[in-house]
Every structure is written in structure tokens, then in C-alpha cells.
Image (cartoon, helix red, strand yellow):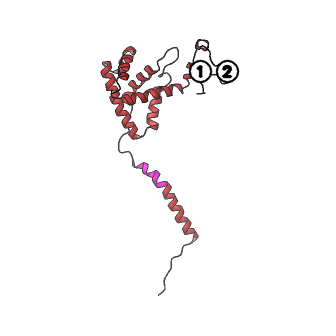
Amino acid sequence: MTTVTPSMSRRSMLRGTITIAGAAIVLPSMAGLAGCSSAPASLDTHKDMIAALADRIIPATDTPGASAAGVPQYIADVFADFFTEDQQSEFAAGLDGLASTLDEIGGGDFAALSPDKQDAALTKFVDDQDAAGQFEWQQIRDMTIFGYYTSEIATQELSFEEVPGRYEACIPLAEVDRAWLNRGV
């Protein structure tokens, strides 16, 4: 009786190592192909309210407002591209609370109210720290300010000079007409 001892060649060892390494790289990426268990949250039902809030935070004056700078779309893009599914669900649920609170305070659909009534409703809302939607209000406010001041429209509001002249530490704002942007956008 002869016994056969298995032998391993260098080629079979490399083939096995490459197969294992390839599986370790490919299999985790295939897990995402299984599909989603639920539909992702959406801002479609709140887009008018978000646009109205953005316009009350940065209204159009002698310079374009938040809507003209594309802030509502910026907020929707941040929501879709950078929020996790859990964050999207929580934010959408919080927006439901914010919408119902603002509608109740304003006496109707917040987005359809006049700007004066929107301002009055927002003032009452901000003063009531226990009102539903305070966290989402703060997020919308922050994203509106960031989205606006990183847009090209902000260059119309803020003066910017790539290579300024001499440094003057204290000058009246009336002489320069606008606040100065201290960094490039």
C-alpha cells in the first residue's frame, strides 16, 4: 500500500492567496447589492417650508436672498448625499414636528403665509425652547447660513479684494459700504 502525500506548489499557494484576497475585497461590496429594506426619507413634502424658512433667515434685500443662492437645493443635496438613513428619518420626522408647530403658531400653512406673519410665527417659535422641531430649526438655520455664504451670490454681499492695499484697523463701515469677507469663497 502506498500513501500519497499531498504536495503544494508555489503556483497553487499563490492562486489560493489571490482567491482569498479577492473574495475579501469583492464580497463586502456585494453586500450593498442586496437592496434596501425601506424607502429612504424624502424632503419633498417640506421643500416649500424649507424655502420659506431660508428666505426668512436670509431675505432678499439689495442683494439676492437664500432662494436665489440655491440654498433650498443645497439643503436637499446635503440631506440626500451626507445624512445616513437614520439621520434622514430623524430629520424628516423632526421636520414634521417643526411644520405642525409653525402651522399652529402661524394659523395656517407656514409657506403660504405672508412674510410678516412668517416672521411673527418664527419669533414665537424661537422664544419657545420646548416647541417641537427646535433641533431641526437650528440645522436648517445653520445649513442656510453656510449654504448662502459659500455660494457665489455671497460675493455680491461681502466685499472681497484678493490683494488688498494697506491695512487700516479701524474704519467706519459707511466708508466701505459692506462687511468684508476675510477668506476666499
Residue 1: give x, y in percent of width and height: 47, 87
Q: Judging from the image, what secondary structure is the residue with disc 1 in?
A: loop
Give the magenta-colored segment's residue range.
26-33
List the residue tagged with mark 2.
Answer: 167
Residue 136: give x, y in percent of width and height: 39, 30
Disc 1 crowd, CA 10 A, few/some/many (<14, 14-19, 20+): some
Rendered residue at 49%/57% (across/down): 24
Rendered residue at 36%/36% (across/down): 90
Q: Nearer the viewer, residue 150 or 4?
A: 150
Disc number for residue 19: none
Residue 7: give x, y in percent of width and height: 53, 75
Q: Nearer the viewer, residue 175 or 26?
A: 175
Q: Residue 105, relative to residue 83: is it above or below?
A: above
Q: Is residue 41 visible?
A: no
Q: Name the magenta segment's main secondary structure.
A: helix
Q: Judging from the image, what secondary structure is the residue with disc 2 in?
A: loop
Residue 122: give x, y in percent of width and height: 38, 20
The three-letter code of the residue at mark 1 reads Trp
Let me know if residue 28 is in the magenta part.
Answer: yes
Give the farthest residue toward the front: 170
- Distance between the Cα atoms at labels 1 and 2? 13 Å
List the residue tagged with mark 1.
Answer: 180
The three-letter code of the residue at mark 2 reads Tyr
Picture quadrant where residue 156 is located: top right
Picture quadrant where residue 132 is located: top left
Rendered residue at 35%/27% (across/down): 98
| Left or right of 161 on screen, residue 55 | left
